[in-house]
Image (spheres, rainbow, N blue to C red):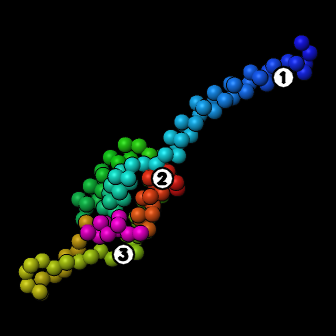
Amino acid sequence: MNAVEQGRAGARTAAPVAAVLLLLAAPAAAEARRGVPRGDAESFAMGACLTRQTPERLRDEGFLWTRAVMERGGDLATWRALGDAVVAEAARRPVPQGRGDGPVADPLTPMPVLHCHEVVRSPAVRAAITRAVRGAR
């Protein structure tokens, strides 16, 4: 067998091997592009917002919440992009204030949980959640 015939024979055996390698790599590549479940993205967004609130117990709960969601899966870049969108939106919005059922003279009370709910439902954060679900950054 001369060099040209050996090259053709090698090419014929290399092509099926390359095809098998591509088939084996395809699920891994698809897995890397796959996003996170919508519920996890929404939970992470709420927890990330809570980490920015004034009461220490809300901050602590926010850190625990986001860590628990991240442990379920997803890559760090996805979570970071979503967290950045939440932080930016939270900075743009004032924390709502409410008054109880007492006299009108009662002081206004900050409502950080409502603030986080509004942040998560904002168009900018909803778009970031959709990108996280789709696996886009």
Task: Report the mark closest to the observer, 3 or 1.
Answer: 1
Among the 4 quarters of the image, the one containing residue 112:
bottom left
| Residue 67 % position (x, y) | 35, 48
Identify which amino acid the numbered label 3 is placed on. Answer: Arg
Task: Report the mark closest to the observer, 2 or 3.
Answer: 2
Answer left or right for 76 relative to 108. Answer: right
**Highlighted magenta segment, given as a residue range:** 114-123
Query: Tags 1 and 2 in contact by the CB under 8 Å rule?
Result: no
Identify which amino acid the numbered label 1 is placed on. Answer: Arg
Answer left or right for 117 relative to 24. Answer: left
Answer left or right for 94 relative to 3. Answer: left
Magenta span includes 57:
no
Kindly report the distance in space between the C-alpha atoms of the residues bearing marks 1 and 2.
43 Å
Q: Residue 8, labelled with which disc?
A: 1
Q: Residue 134, labelled with which disc?
A: 2
Q: Residue 93, labelled with which disc?
A: 3
| Circle nearer the N terminus (3, 1) | 1
Mark 2 neighbour class, 10 Å CA radius: few under 14, some 14 to 19, many 20 or more = some
Among the 4 quarters of the image, the one containing residue 1:
top right
Looking at this view, name the residue that lies furthest to the bottom: 105
**Helix, strand, or loop for circle 3?**
loop
Query: Tags 2 and 3 in contact by the CB under 8 Å rule?
Result: no
Task: Report the mark closest to the observer, 1 or 2.
Answer: 1
| Residue 86 % position (x, y) | 40, 64
Magenta span includes 118:
yes
Q: Which residue is drawn at the image coordinates 36% and 51% (left, top)? A: 40
Among the 4 quarters of the image, the one containing residue 132:
bottom left
**Helix, strand, or loop for circle 1?**
helix
